[in-house]
Amino acid sequence: MTLSARQQDFLNRLLDLYREAQAPVHYADVARALDVKPVTAYEMLRLLEDKGLVHSEMTRPQGHKGRSVIVFAPTEKSTAILSQLTGNSPSDGEWEQAKTGILQALESAKGTDYHRLLDEILLRIPETRSSLLFAADMVTAIILALYDLRDSAAASGIFSTLRRFGPPGWAILYSLAGFSLALSLVEKANRRAASLLLAHAQQFRHHLDALTQGEKARLSDFVYDVLRTLGL
């Protein structure tokens, strides 16, 4: 089965909301989460239901005497499909190994311009299957590309903005996704790095959307570990 990027976005967001609520989700909540019209969310969820990835039911909100509403929940098949499309989540050991490897590489490269390490990370990004590991490489590469511009007023403002988010928080992850696009517009940016980051930007956003709450928390903490290691 194939899903468009938009279909993946809706399914991922439904999964997140379902996990948070531990209950089926009203389509209006999905619409708010994705900033689309309720009818758009309803039609997309019905399409995903036709594919066997979502099921709907009629329910009456607890404590209300009004008419029943339609709510949606992901099926077991949806999790399997998304795992195939975005890569299986790494084990705790795999994540710790990957995280430690990056942080140790940053420590070892202190006193350099980090260009060699940035090139190594950019080269392996297309080969990374897990959403979490892909995102970890991407955020590291984006921060290193920004670090190269640290003396510029624009980069100083960006790092100041990132520090204000404060852990834990997911806003920093989507902000970094935006900065990967902005790098292509910065005159003094490493052109090769900016070009490769731009090529992966859309896939990065999809992988972020595919992460579970726990994975987003892990990745957010990792971002601050990288910033601290770089002295930012």
Image: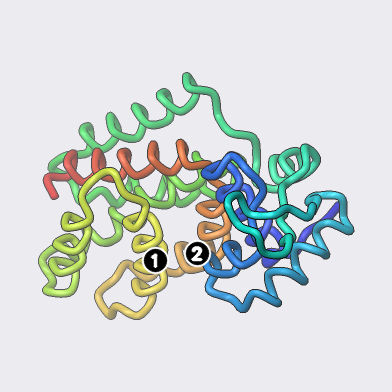
Q: CA distance from mark 2 to mark 1?
A: 7 Å
Q: Residue 77 placed where, x, y %? A: 80, 40
Q: Is residue 125 left or right of residue 96?
A: right
Residue 180: give its label: 1
153 is higher (above) or lower (below) than 92:
below
Mark 2 falls on what kind of element? helix
- What is the crowding at mark 2: few (fewer than 14 residues within 10 Å), some, or many (at least 20)? some
Residue 201: give its label: 2
Residue visible at 45% across and 36% down?
Answer: 214
- Residue 66 in which image quadrant: bottom right
Q: Residue 90 placed where, x, y %? A: 55, 29
189 is higher (above) or lower (below) than 56:
below
Residue visible at 28% across and 53% down?
Answer: 144
- Amino acid marked by disc 1: Ser
166 is higher (above) or lower (below) than 33:
above
User: Depth check: 232 or 78 in front?
Assistant: 78
User: Depth check: 3 or 122 in front?
Assistant: 3
* N-term mark: 2 or 1: 1
